[in-house]
Image (tube, rainbow, N blue to C red):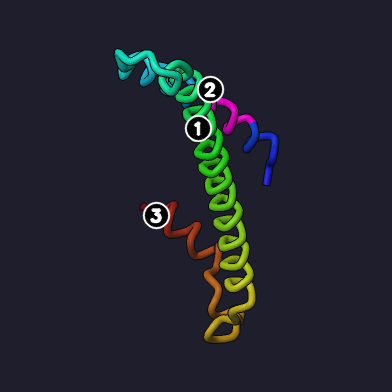
Amino acid sequence: MNYKCVACSALIVAAAGALIGLAIAEIASPPFHSRFYRDLRHRYFLIGAGAGLLFGAGQESVRQLKKQQDQEEAAERLRQDLVVAPSEPLTKASLPSPEIEGKADSAS
């Protein structure tokens, strides 16, 4: 897993989450002036950034794990295709002759 990519994705989505948190704080600003409501912008900023960080890291991790799983499945399928023996043994008679195919193409 590429941890640099996970960290970059987490930081980008955290920045977007922080901006969304600030926007929500501005839109939903209450008219009250008590101690609880004073740092509301700061709280929403941190909540949005934290949620974005977790979401971005999780999303990128799942994407990379899916990619790794697909590669492993493709390698397993390739291994199975190579291991499976043909139903009948290959002989010269069962293989197509290039001379016959060449004549058929030129006759057309």
Residue type pointed to by label 2: Ala
Residue contact at pointers 3 and 1, CB within 8 angstroms:
no
User: Residue drawn at (36%, 21%), measured in percent from left and top?
Assistant: 24
Q: Nearer the viewer, residue 36 or 29?
A: 36
Task: Point out which mark residue 15 bears.
Answer: 2
Q: Earlier in the sequence, mark 3 or mark 1?
A: 1
Q: Which x, y percent locates residue 89?
A: 59, 85
The residue that mark 1 highlights is 52
Residue 52 visible to the viewer: yes
Q: Nearer the viewer, residue 42 or 60?
A: 42
The residue that mark 3 highlights is 107
User: Residue drawn at (53%, 45%), measured in percent from left and top?
Assistant: 63
Image position of 61 (left or right of 30): right
Badge 2 crowding class, 10 Å Cα cut-off, few under 14, some 14 to 19, many 20 or more, is some
Q: Nearer the viewer, residue 13 or 104?
A: 13
Residue contact at pointers 1 and 2, CB within 8 angstroms:
yes
Badge 1 crowding class, 10 Å Cα cut-off, few under 14, some 14 to 19, many 20 or more, is many
- Residue segment shown in magenta: 8-15
Front: mark 2 or 3: 2
